[in-house]
Image (cartoon, rainbow, N blue to C red):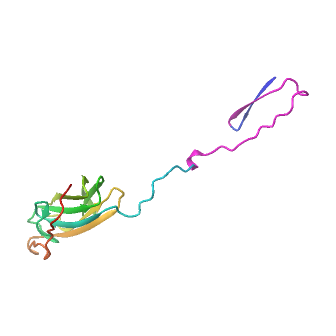
């Protein structure tokens, strides 16, 4: 005689020839394991950026991979601004320049960093009525803001666009 019992979603088979002759077989029940609770090998938590921005500047031009000037105030007679960064320690990663106007994202530019030192620049065309604070955040692949810098876009009559007093030029290593 074969008896089939459905117990907690498991089909259990039991057989015996005669009730008197067959010993009782006790089956040990085990708990079901929730596979979502099993820990898998996880990547170590990254708590800090892996590289740095050595030089950052808002500029109107770049010559020989170097920004010409560093602007903090730009008149609205200028319709295009560049943001230059000299990146260190990000080889093999994707770095982003994210442009914001009054806390609203206006552009997002990605760069594949191919060397231990990598110089990149993004540009933004500006409309004359987009007056106010502009910010670019440099963001690494883990979402860390590695650098943040701002400039003010003002009406032409308010002030004259001038480079900051410090030069941003740097000599030395080039991309590998």
In this rendering, position of residue 46 left or right of residue 133: right
Q: In the rendering, at what x and y percent does residue 119 appear?
A: 19, 59
Quadrant of residue 98 within the rendered picture: bottom left
Q: Residue 10 lies in magenta, yes or no?
A: yes
Q: Does the image show residue 102?
A: no
Measuring 27% from the left and 63% from the top, which residue is drawn there? 137
How many circles with numbers are drawn on the protein?
0
Which of the pair 153/86 is nearer the observer?
86
**145 relative to 55 in the view: left or right:** right
Whether residue 2 appears in magenta in the rendering, the answer is: no
Percent position (x, y) of residue 80?
12, 60
- Our reading of the magenta stretch's main secondary structure is loop
**Residue 147 against residue 31 in the figure, above or below:** below
Residue at 76% over, 40% down: 28
Q: Residue furthest right?
A: 20
- The reply to whether residue 33 is visible in this rendering is yes
The front one of 104 and 137 is: 137
* Residue at screen point 34% across, 61% down: 50
Q: Position of residue 175 (x, y in %)?
A: 19, 56
Q: Residue furthest bottom?
A: 165
Quarter of the image where one finds residue 147: bottom left
The quadrant of the image that shows the C terminus is bottom left
Quarter of the view holding residue 88: bottom left
**Residue 121 locus on image (x, y percent):** 18, 58
Residue at coordinates 21% horizontally, 62% vertically from top-left? 85
Q: Nearer the viewer, residue 54 or 152?
A: 54
What quarter of the picture does the N terminus occupy?
top right
Q: Is residue 159 left or right of residue 51?
A: left
Highlighted range, magenta: 9-37
């Amino acid at each position: 005689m074969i008896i089939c019992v459905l117990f907690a979603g498991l089909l259990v088979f039991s057989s015996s020839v005669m009730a008197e002759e067959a010993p009782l077989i006790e089956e040990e029940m085990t708990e079901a394991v929730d596979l979502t609770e099993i820990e898998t090998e996880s990547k170590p938590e990254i708590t800090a950026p892996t590289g740095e921005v050595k030089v950052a500047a808002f500029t109107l031009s770049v010559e020989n991979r170097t920004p010409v000037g560093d602007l903090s105030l730009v008149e609205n007679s200028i319709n295009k601004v560049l943001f230059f960064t000299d990146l260190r320690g990000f080889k093999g990663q994707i770095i982003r320049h994210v442009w914001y106007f009054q806390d609203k994202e206006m552009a997002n530019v990605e760069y594949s960093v191919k060397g231990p030192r990598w110089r990149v620049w993004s540009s933004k065309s500006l409309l004359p009525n987009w007056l106010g604070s502009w910010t670019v955040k440099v963001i690494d692949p883990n979402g860390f803001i590695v650098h943040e810098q701002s400039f003010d876009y003002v009406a032409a009559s308010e002030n004259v666009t001038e480079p900051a007093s410090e030069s941003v030029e740097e000599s030395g290593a080039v991309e590998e």
